[in-house]
Image (spheres, rainbow, N blue to C red):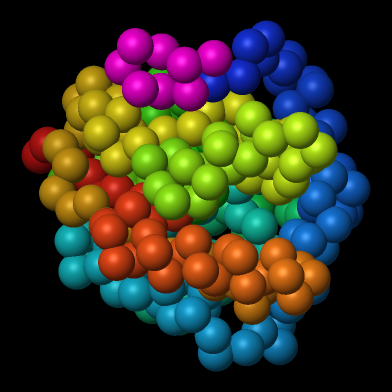
């Protein structure tokens, strides 16, 4: 479905139980085959690649904005961001809906992770920073998610949100392919089963500001194809679209940094 504001979303939305099951399936490689490598490459022997450098840059920006303190990472992936946050001067705490992901992160990085819904998690003292990398599009209610973040952040604290950018060359091509008989199955590689909301930079900024936070930085970036397993023709096509996105300012990912008024 497409709202008149430009937001695209899934209807009907899954129940919280269905969403949790899908996230655990995704962690175990049960949704998209191409993402399985992502959940093996970024543990304790992680490479120094664009994904890792991007996480380090995020931690550095948040440290500059807040001066450090507690950092809560919502939807921890492999736990790598928590590990890098610890190296960068934060006290990290993860909040993860997938028990498997939480246990693996503890084993690999020795980080503290709570299993459960962020909406009801007890994170203790107000955090200096909250990170949501590729998370908000997975939740059935993004506004409640972001409202919760705004409520528990300390005054002057910072929120980092990153999501796929629906106003990008990748999604433009996907929407065209969806109309071509026999090619529509390729679209499922972008419109994946556990993504329920498809934001543009404008709709994401508007949502974050509506919960009382002040947006201070909006960045666009391209995904790193090295962490996905694609056939050569698919990889070449995606690389071409990504390069076109960089030339036109329609990159496939958007990042927003926002602060809570002091």
Q: Nearer the viewer, residue 54 or 20?
A: 54
Predominant secondary structure, magenta span:
loop
The reply to whether the magenta stretch includes residue 3 is: yes
173 lies left or right of 21: left
Q: Residue at 61%, 19% (x, y): give it.
A: 10
Picture coordinates of residue 234, whole percent (x, y): 71, 65
| Residue 140 vertical placement versus 67 (above, below) | above
| Residue 6 in sight | yes
- Quadrant the C terminus occupies: top left
How many marks overall? 0
Picture coordinates of residue 246, whole percent (x, y): 34, 66
Q: Residue at 68%, 41% (x, y): give it.
A: 187
| Residue 103 in sight | no
Picture coordinates of residue 114, whole percent (x, y): 66, 45
- Quadrant the N terminus occupies: top right
| Residue 19 vertical placement versus 185 (above, below) | above
| Residue 20 vertical placement versus 25 (above, below) | above
| Residue 257 vertical placement versus 89 (above, below) | above
Residue at the left extreme of this rendering: 262
Q: Residue at 18%, 61% (x, y): give it.
A: 65
- For residue 203, what is the image quadrant? top left
- For residue 89, what is the image quadrant? bottom left
Q: Residue at 76%, 33% (x, y): give it.
A: 181
Q: Which stretch appears magenta?
A: 1-8
Q: Nearer the viewer, residue 128 or 18?
A: 18
Q: Nearer the viewer, residue 225 or 130?
A: 225
The reply to whether the magenta stretch includes residue 230 is: no
Picture coordinates of residue 207, whole percent (x, y): 30, 26
């Amino acid at each position: 479905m497409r709202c008149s504001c430009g937001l695209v979303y899934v209807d009907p939305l899954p129940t919280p139980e269905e969403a949790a099951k899908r996230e655990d399936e995704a962690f175990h490689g049960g949704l998209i085959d191409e993402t399985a490598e992502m959940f093996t490459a970024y543990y304790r022997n992680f490479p120094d690649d664009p994904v890792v450098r991007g996480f380090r840059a995020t931690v550095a920006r948040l440290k500059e904005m807040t001066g450090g303190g507690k950092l809560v990472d919502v939807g921890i992936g492999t736990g790598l961001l928590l590990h890098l946050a610890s190296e960068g001067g934060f006290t990290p705490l993860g909040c993860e809906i997938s028990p498997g992901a939480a246990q693996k992160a503890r084993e690999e990085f020795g980080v503290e992770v709570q299993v459960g819904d962020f909406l009801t998690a007890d994170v203790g003292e107000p955090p200096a920073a909250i990170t949501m990398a590729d998370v908000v599009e997975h939740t059935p209610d993004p506004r409640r998610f972001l409202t919760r973040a705004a409520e528990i952040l300390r005054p002057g604290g910072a929120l980092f949100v990153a999501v796929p950018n629906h106003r990008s060359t990748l999604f433009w091509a996907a929407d065209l392919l969806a109309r071509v008989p026999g090619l529509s199955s390729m679209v499922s590689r972008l419109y994946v089963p556990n993504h329920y909301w498809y934001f543009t930079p404008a709709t994401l900024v508007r949502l974050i500001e509506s919960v009382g936070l002040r947006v201070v930085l909006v960045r666009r970036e391209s995904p790193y194809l090295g962490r996905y397993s694609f056939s050569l023709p698919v990889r070449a096509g995606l690389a071409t679209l990504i390069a076109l996105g960089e030339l036109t300012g329609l990159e496939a990912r958007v990042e927003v940094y926002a602060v809570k008024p002091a």
